[in-house]
Image (cartoon, rainbow, N blue to C red):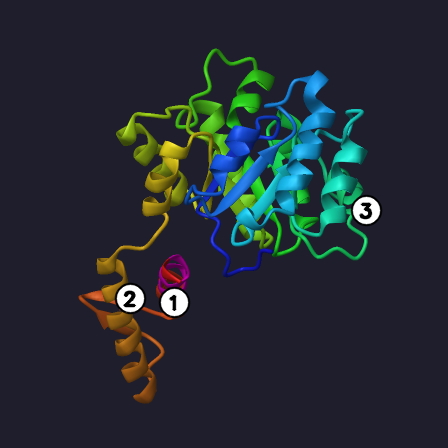
């Protein structure tokens, strides 16, 4: 379902217990859809929601979509049935909430057996943030690490969940750093503003500048803005192509380092330009 070239710019949560929302999700331009069996579903609706989500995973309406299911947590009575039902379809990736240790990753992965589907973990507690490196190290390069700042704020007894200040911002940085260090894909926290375009864009830009590869979304309106921020611009692509062409010339002349527009260019810069082109091409395929 997911490899290093798959897009993961916008990852939209959809309540697993609401058939109308599930049906609508098929037409939304999010890179990935998360059918939520956890926070969005009341205890009395858990089993029914699981049935609806399993049916959606097999629906032709979602054939071209990356699908993820946020199962209930490891300590809940619904976890085992959730993960077994989803993995049996061979279609949906698993999103594990409140991941706090490498042991949590190992326990979740023990259900995968020979299944090659990726695992998305959400780090959303103080313990999880402190263990971010161990968690990321336990994952593979096809897995993802998400930051859940709202639950983290509650765990830290904060008055509000502002992802751009204080300890939440520090944790947001730490999660991205840990994921990148060990090769997992970092996915940024949700933006609680669902209609303020400027607030959505600014929060998304902050995540991009922290090294995140995409963003969790809680409303369809956020998707287009998030996709735009995480897609390289035409100007960036033009500059990347020019730098790579100059690099080819420098290589032919035996130069490992050269200047472009009065700035030094070496291999790390070249890799960044190649990444820009790969992301642009993936977004336009």
Pick whichever, 61 or 255, lies toward us. 61
**Label placed on residue 274:** 1
Q: Residue at 62% of width from left, 41% of height from top?
A: 56
Element marked by disc 2: helix
Give whichever of discs 2 and 1 has the lower sequence position. 2
What distance separates the C-alpha of mark 3 from that of mark 2?
A: 42 Å
The residue pinned by badge 3 equals 110
- Membership of 136 in magenta stretch: no
**Which stretch is magenta?**
277-283
The residue pinned by badge 2 equals 240
Q: Is residue 120 visible?
A: no
Relative to 262, residue 49 above or below: above
Asked if marks 2 and 1 touch (Cβ < 8 Å), the reply is yes
Asked if marks 3 and 2 touch (Cβ < 8 Å), the reply is no
Residue 275, position in %: x, y?
40, 62
Residue 2, position in %: x, y?
58, 56
* 177 sits left or right of 265 in the view: right
């Amino acid at each position: 379902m997911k490899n290093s070239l798959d897009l993961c710019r916008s990852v939209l949560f959809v309540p697993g217990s609401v058939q109308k929302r599930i049906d609508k999700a098929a037409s939304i331009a999010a890179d990935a859809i998360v059918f939520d069996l956890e926070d969005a579903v009341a205890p009395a609706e858990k089993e029914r929601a699981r049935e609806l989500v399993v049916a959606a995973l097999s629906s032709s309406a979602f054939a071209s979509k990356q699908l993820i299911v946020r199962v209930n947590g490891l300590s809940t009575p619904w976890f085992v049935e959730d993960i077994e039902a989803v993995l049996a379809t061979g279609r949906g990736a698993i999103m594990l909430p409140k991941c706090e240790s490498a042991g949590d990753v190992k326990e979740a992965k023990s259900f995968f057996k020979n299944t090659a589907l990726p695992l998305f973990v959400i780090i959303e507690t103080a313990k999880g943030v402190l263990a971010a490196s161990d968690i990321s190290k336990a994952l593979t390069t096809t897995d993802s690490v998400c930051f859940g700042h709202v639950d983290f704020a509650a765990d830290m007894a904060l008055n509000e969940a502002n992802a751009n200040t204080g300890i939440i911002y520090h944790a947001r940085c730490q999660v991205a750093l840990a994921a990148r260090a060990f090769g997992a894909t970092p996915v940024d926290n949700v933006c609680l503003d669902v209609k303020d375009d400027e607030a959505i864009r600014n929060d998304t830009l902050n995540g991009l500048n922290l090294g995140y590869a995409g963003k969790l979304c809680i409303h369809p309106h956020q998707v287009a803005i998030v996709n735009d921020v995480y897609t390289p611009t035409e100007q960036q692509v033009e500059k990347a192509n020019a730098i790579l062409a100059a690099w080819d010339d420098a290589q032919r002349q035996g130069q490992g380092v050269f200047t472009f527009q009065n700035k030094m260019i070496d291999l790390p810069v070249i890799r960044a330009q190649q990444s820009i082109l790969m992301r642009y091409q993936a977004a336009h395929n």
